[in-house]
Amino acid sequence: MKRLFRILFLSLILTGFIYSIYYLFGLFSDSSKEEFFLEKKDNIEFGFNLDNYRVDRDTIQFGDSFGEIMLRNKMSYSQIYNIVQSIKDSFDVRWLTAGKPYTILSTKDSTAIPKYFIYQPNLLNYVVIDFSNFDSISAYNQKKPFKIVNKTTSGVITSSLSETMDENGLPWELINQLSDVYAWTIDFTRIQKGDSFKIIYNERYIEDTILVGIKNIDAAYFKHNGEELFAFNFVTDSLKKTSEFYDQNGNSLERTFLKSPVRFSNISSRYNLKRRIAYYGNKVRPHKGTDFAAPTGTPIMATADGRVEKSAYTRANGYYVKIKHNDTYSTQYLHMQKNGRVKKGQYVKQGDVIGRIGMTGNTSGPHVCYRFWKNNRQVDPFKQKLPAGRPVPSELKVNFEIYKVPFEETLNQINFE
């Protein structure tokens, strides 16, 4: 019997030795290795090994607050107050939005003391509030790991650009980005049936299959009214990683606005939401325009290309002109003389005379009140980050010519869907 046990024991040792030799010299297949030496992978998410914590996931409900959520998870009022005060400069807990998911990581023992609160405002980004040590509470923003997938698409306009792209199953974010690319060169309200487009773009995916948005457009082609318009997204500042869209000749697709609608004029009053106006008894009345003072009869110029949306009269504005430049920007010019104004529907170019300085409407002196709209909201034009409209810098022209070649070839090879 002892001899039998000795034989079995030696057999086990020999078998283990043989397996070790096979593994060391790669004689197992990969699948065999996985079966014989099975390793458990770490359950990593948000930069934490979730196996080390109790994990509670939920969604922000209407009426929920950070304090109420943490009270339900065994935290005291004083602890919650300390957390909120410690992170107020980096994250405002009032930003929590109903419908968004959150995760609480707590100790894995019976006490289940919360250590981290993780808020997800969208699929890609998340905020970690770290109170694992109450002497060093912090909050920081992170992104989930994602991969970039390069894609191409095309289409022929049947009604409008947005409807055609939507019918082709393209995301709205891509529709908006393409509109932005050509916002200065195409009037999308005048798109024609039969116009066509091609796009080379990049999508972000997390967990390989979940689309979390469009990263950017690399290049595009638009045929409008018989004219072919190429667009190449070229980086002009490698340090800041800033890029602009240029046509095949290296000209910017964006057009700059003139700083003033009147030459040789002075700004008599700036955009000021707290300005007091003598005409109204020195009461506070928001002034959403910029006044350029000049003699009566001085020409007023369009600050950018566009189509005249209104050429009319109101008691306050006097005779005025409003120009729509694209789907984002519009400008308005108030207190003009009655005669010499451009007509509604007329297309004007940057620098064209659209009227002359007058004193019509509510005004105490000759000037033009210049108003600037962005996304249907009046804003201060001098505080807007407006397109520069400059061509590719001369020192980068060769790099641009090399850069655009593969994109141009790809665009030419894309068939219209």
Image (cartoon, rainbow, N blue to C red):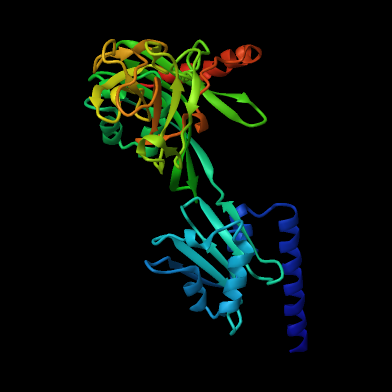
Residue 187 sits in which quadrant? top left
The front one of 230 and 332 is 332
Asked if residue 252 lies left or right of residue 333, the reply is: right
Name the spot of residue 397 as percent of width and height, x first. 61, 12
Residue shown at 74% from the left, 52% from the top: 25
Q: Is residue 401 visible?
A: yes
Q: Is residue 256 above or below residue 316?
A: above
Residue 189 sits in which quadrant? top left
Q: Is residue 388 above or below residue 136?
A: above
Residue shown at 59% from the left, 15% from the top: 402
Q: Is residue 213 above or below residue 342?
A: below
The front one of 374 and 341 is 341
Residue shown at 50% from the left, 72% from the top: 67
Asked if residue 247 lies left or right of residue 399, the reply is: left
Name the spot of residue 407 as percent of width and height, x first. 49, 20
Name the spot of residue 154 as percent of width and height, x first. 35, 26
